């Protein structure tokens, strides 16, 4: 136990280190908001600096955000100078072994601790045993999406039309004919509403603000073409297979569809930012189309009947588009807030990139294939969804630490959002209220980790700077735990021991 003065000096040094690191990272990118974490509460209080500017209403795809620079290379001493104590593995076995036997973690928990710089496993217990990961599976989702799509990729939601009137093509009959009949035909043609289609691209972060901007751009484009009445259609054909997650209707996730507004949330949580359970609509796509039609009417356009679901014509002309933030920012937000809707969106984007069906089955195949191509230890893994809500998901603690180590690889800067999106113990996201017990307080502010919780399933996987200054990746998986609160405290205690 540290003496009070020693503890104060240690804590002060840690805080100073975090401040310096935050300042350096804020200058490096890729940023949209000047944050490398997407947590809604903590990030809202920070100054917004840097970032890729995406002007509203621009018809072209925005320029990508710059890729992450090697921040750690600039801050850290050379790897050779960071030599872990030779007796560290033995020390970890002595410390973690008894804690892992806690009945709060169920009968047979799994554990893996890896030295990120060398890849050496310093501690392992059933590290190759496939177990239910709960939301720690989102680490695999993040690595696959960033690797396949790139951190700068943005998801578009578009409005298109194949109607000649909206394109400004007044195709008269140049071969003559009765002039009055021609005028009558033109009048009848002009009275018909122009058909426009709202095409869902799979953006789970589309909100009212961006939908309003999309409607404004669409109305402007139509007015420029002399169109004042439209028939609204919506296209969700990008996704296939069941819309409902295998867990069925649930406050933790909306039906999985290529078009939604505010994640189909029916309460006030859709007004500001997302994250956490909320009542969900049974038809997010239809509701988004209805909201879009309302916004068009507010802008002076007439609409003919309610929106109808229909696939957009192949030769459609784009009227307007809105883009999500880069995948790097989506990954951070998904990890910090454990956002299930973003997770299911990202695995389907991975499937689309791979040319597979954007369904639960297609996404599973695409993610596992992507991780296998990256030569990660996917043996025994079963990734039935991207969110971890499926109790049939299986990963090993060894795979989780391998994913985290890969994300820290200096040669893979595109994967860095996996680490920067992890919640900070005691401060942000799903770890905000944890690490408060006396036996875990040393981990507060020092650990970044993804949580996982289902009934009887608790998990924790993340990073921490351990003895000798080495960055360690850890993963703990517990099944048949008697209670979530006691299991979480046991996991916090386990990970906190890695700081000393």
Image: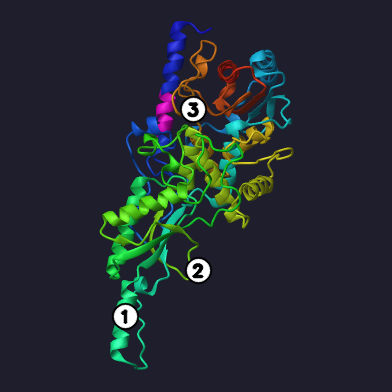
**What segment carries the magenta color?**
16-23
User: For the residue carrying disc 1, how many other residues have a C-alpha within 10 Å: few (<14), some (14-19), or many (20+)?
Assistant: some
Percent across and percent down for residue 39 are: 43, 33
Q: Are marks 2 and 1 in contact (CB under 8 Å)?
A: no
Residue bearing the label numbered 1: 186
Q: Is residue 142 magenta?
A: no
Residue farthest to the left? 300
Q: Earlier in the sequence, mark 3 or mark 2?
A: 2
Residue bearing the label numbered 2: 314
Identified at 49% across, 27% down, the residue is 430
Q: Is residue 164 visible?
A: yes
Q: Is residue 32 left or right of residue 351?
A: left
Front: mark 3 or 2: 2
Q: Which of these two is toward me, 310 or 46? A: 310
Percent across and percent down for residue 197 are: 42, 61
Element type at mark 2: loop
- Seen in the picture, residue 135 relative to 30 is either above or below; the reply is above
Percent across and percent down for residue 186 are: 31, 80
Q: Is residue 17 magenta?
A: yes
Tell me how far mark 1 sits from mark 3, CA to CA: 61 Å
């Amino acid at each position: 136990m540290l003496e009070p003065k020693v503890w104060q000096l240690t804590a002060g040094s840690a805080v100073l280190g975090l401040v310096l690191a935050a300042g350096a990272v804020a200058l490096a990118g890729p940023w949209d908001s000047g944050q490398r974490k997407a947590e809604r509460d903590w990030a809202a209080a920070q100054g917004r600096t840097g970032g890729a500017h995406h002007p509203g209403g621009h018809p072209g795809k925005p320029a990508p955000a710059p890729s992450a620079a090697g921040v750690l290379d600039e801050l850290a001493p050379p790897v050779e100078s960071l030599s872990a104590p030779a007796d560290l593995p033995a020390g970890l076995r002595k410390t973690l072994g008894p804690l892992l036997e806690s009945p709060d973690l169920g009968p047979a928990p799994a554990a893996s601790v890896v030295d990120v710089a060398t890849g050496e496993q310093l501690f392992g217990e059933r590290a190759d045993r496939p177990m239910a990961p709960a939301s720690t599976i989102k680490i695999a989702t993040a690595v696959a999406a960033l690797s396949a799509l790139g951190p700068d990729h943005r998801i578009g939601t578009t409005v298109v039309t194949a109607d000649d009137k909206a394109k400004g093509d007044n195709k008269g009959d140049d071969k003559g004919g009765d002039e009055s009949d021609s005028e009558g035909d033109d009048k009848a043609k002009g009275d018909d509403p122009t058909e426009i289609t709202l095409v869902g691209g799979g953006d789970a972060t589309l909100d009212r603000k961006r939908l309003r901007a999309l409607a404004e751009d669409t109305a402007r484009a139509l007015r420029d073409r002399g169109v004042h009445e439209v028939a609204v259609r919506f296209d969700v054909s990008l996704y296939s297979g069941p819309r409902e997650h295998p867990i069925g209707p649930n406050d933790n996730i909306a039906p999985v569809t290529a078009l939604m507004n505010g994640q189909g949330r029916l309460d006030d949580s859709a007004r500001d930012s997302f994250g956490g359970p909320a009542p969900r609509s049974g038809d997010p796509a239809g509701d988004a189309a209805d909201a879009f039609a309302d916004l068009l009417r507010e802008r002076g356009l007439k609409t003919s009947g309610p929106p109808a679901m229909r696939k957009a014509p192949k030769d459609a002309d784009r009227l307007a588009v809105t883009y999500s933030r880069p995948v790097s920012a989506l990954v951070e937000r998904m990890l910090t807030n454990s956002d299930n809707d973003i997770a299911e969106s990202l695995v389907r984007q991975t499937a689309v990139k791979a040319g597979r069906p954007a369904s639960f089955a297609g996404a599973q195949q695409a993610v596992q294939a992507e991780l296998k191509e990256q030569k990660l230890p996917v043996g025994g893994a079963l990734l039935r969804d991207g969110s971890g809500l499926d109790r049939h998901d299986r990963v090993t603690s060894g795979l989780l630490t391998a994913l985290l180590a890969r994300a820290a690889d200096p040669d893979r800067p595109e994967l860095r959002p996996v680490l920067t999106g992890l919640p900070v113990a005691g401060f942000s996201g799903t770890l905000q209220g944890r690490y408060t017990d006396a036996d875990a307080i040393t981990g507060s502010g020092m650990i970044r980790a993804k949580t996982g919780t289902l009934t009887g399933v608790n998990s924790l996987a993340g990073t921490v700077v351990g003895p000798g200054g080495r960055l360690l990746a850890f993963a703990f998986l517990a099944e048949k735990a008697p209670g979530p609160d006691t299991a979480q405290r046991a996991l916090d205690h386990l990970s906190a021991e890695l700081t000393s």
